[in-house]
């Protein structure tokens, strides 16, 4: 990593995986003046070629071609979850800096190996917890850091959908590939956002329950639209579509309710930060309201601000961490506690008891 910023220096990068997240990474590298999108990689040639043509880049079908090319400094790993750890570790060992999409890996053991490999090779390893770069999220974090909410004693969140199971029958709903369902897919974003805003409190205990009910018969599953679809009627569905839980930290307690799918036709997606002096409700990927009081008077306000593009900010942060030696706010060391919570919640749901987190 560089110690002195050089604004003329560029980072040559490849995006591994040309699905929707890979496309988002590629688009943000293209607009970053210090990044050079040298290649895009996908095992399906037509996907790689289409994205390469869009950004005047090079298409590859084998990521090892990029890893063996010394002209590349970094890669974005935008693959299914089960490939995060093996590709990231191989890239780090090849001397590349890595931005790996969320979740870090299928479990904490894999995540720790990734972290250890990055440190051993003195490479940057950032995780795609993109909300850490959100405008509203960072405004809330600043308010909490300044003490405007007082002590944050509890945070709750909901992400509830009617019938929104993604890619039913594919890798999204296959446990050995995804690691889990709605918790590891959506919950990771909310939990990590909360830990970030609350100053990275250490997690202590977790209790969770999961439900896999509505899509056990894939051909009979009713839906209006499906992200990453259409469904594969001969595929696998062995993950949860609903998860609820409670997490205790050495800061605030955290409670939540998550559902890819439920038989209620109203969606909900927000986070409530409860402080002694004030509270905040953040609409996920949206604006927030502040609820406070002074001299016996209650106040309700909604701040106005310019919102930056999440992925542009994330990619810019990764580029700075590689070229300037600026430690990323999404560095794997900061995100490991999120993975520990996910593991503990899944263990709790399986064992039917509270799990201690170490």
Image (cartoon, helix red, strand yellow):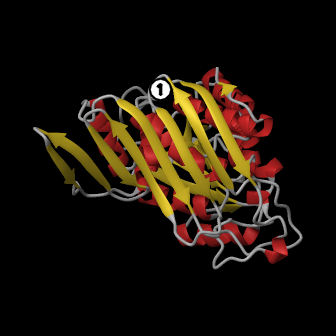
Residue 300 percent coordinates (x, y): 21, 53
Viewer can see residue 146: yes
Q: Quick check: 106 left or right of 313?
A: right
Front one among 244 and 346: 244
Residue at 65% in and 49% down: 243
The residue carrying pointer 1 sits among few (fewer than 14), some (14 to 19) or many (20 or more) residues within 10 Å by Cα, namely: some
Q: Position of residue 96 (x, y in %)?
A: 62, 37
Q: Is residue 258 above or below residue 107?
A: below
Residue 325 lies in quadrant: top left
What count of labels does the image hold? 1
Secondary structure of residue under mark 1:
loop
Q: Is residue 57 above or below residue 244?
A: below
Q: Residue furthest right?
A: 234
> Residue 97: x percent and y percent?
58, 37
Closer to the camera, 251 or 2? 251
Q: Image height check: is 224 above or below 205?
A: below
Seen from the viewer's position, the closer of residues 27 and 308 is 308
In the foreground, 63 or 242: 242
x, y percent for residue 209: 69, 44
Task: Residue at 60%, 52% (x, y): give it.
Answer: 14
In which quadrant of the rendered image does the C terminus lie?
Answer: top right
Residue at image x 64%, y 68%?
164
The residue tagged 1 is 201
The answer, for residue 329, to whether it is visible in the render is no
Q: Residue furthest bottom?
A: 224
Q: Residue at x 85, y 69 (%)?
A: 217
């Amino acid at each position: 990593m560089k110690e002195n910023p050089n604004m003329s220096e560029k980072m040559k990068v490849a995006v591994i995986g040309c699905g929707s997240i890979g496309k988002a990474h590629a688009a943000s590298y293209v607009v970053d003046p210090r990044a050079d999108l040298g290649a895009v990689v996908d095992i399906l040639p037509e996907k790689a070629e289409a994205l390469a043509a869009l950004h005047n880049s090079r298409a590859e079908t084998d990521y090892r071609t990029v890893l063996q090319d010394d002209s590349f400094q970094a890669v974005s790993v935008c693959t299914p979850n089960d490939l995060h750890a093996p590709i990231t570790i191989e890239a780090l060992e090849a001397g590349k800096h890595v931005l790996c999409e969320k979740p870090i890996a299928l479990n904490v053991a894999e995540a720790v190996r990734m972290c250890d490999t990055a440190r051993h090779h003195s490479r940057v390893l950032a995780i795609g917890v993109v909300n850490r770069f959100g405008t509203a999220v960072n405004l809330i974090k600043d308010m909490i850091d300044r003490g405007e909410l007082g002590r944050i004693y509890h945070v709750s969140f909901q992400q509830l959908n009617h019938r929104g199971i993604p890619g039913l029958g594919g890798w999204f709903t296959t446990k050995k590939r995804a690691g889990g369902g709605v918790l590891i897919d959506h919950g990771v974003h909310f939990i990590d956002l909360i830990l970030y805003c609350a100053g990275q409190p250490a997690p202590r205990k977790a209790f969770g329950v999961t439900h896999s009910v509505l899509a056990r018969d894939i051909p009979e599953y009713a839906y209006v639209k499906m992200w990453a679809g259409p469904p594969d009627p001969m595929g696998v569905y062995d993950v949860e579509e609903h998860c609820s839980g409670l997490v205790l930290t050495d800061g605030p307690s955290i409670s939540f309710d998550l559902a890819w799918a439920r038989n209620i036709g109203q969606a909900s997606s927000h986070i409530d930060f409860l402080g002694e002096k004030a509270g905040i409700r953040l609409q996920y990927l949206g604006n927030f309201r502040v609820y406070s009081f002074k001299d016996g008077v209650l106040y309700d306000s909604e701040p106005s601000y310019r919102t930056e593009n999440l992925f542009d900010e994330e990619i810019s942060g990764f580029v700075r961490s590689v070229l300037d030696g600026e430690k990323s706010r999404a560095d794997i060391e900061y995100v490991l506690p999120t993975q520990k919570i996910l593991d503990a919640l899944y263990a709790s749901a399986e064992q039917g008891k509270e799990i201690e987190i170490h």
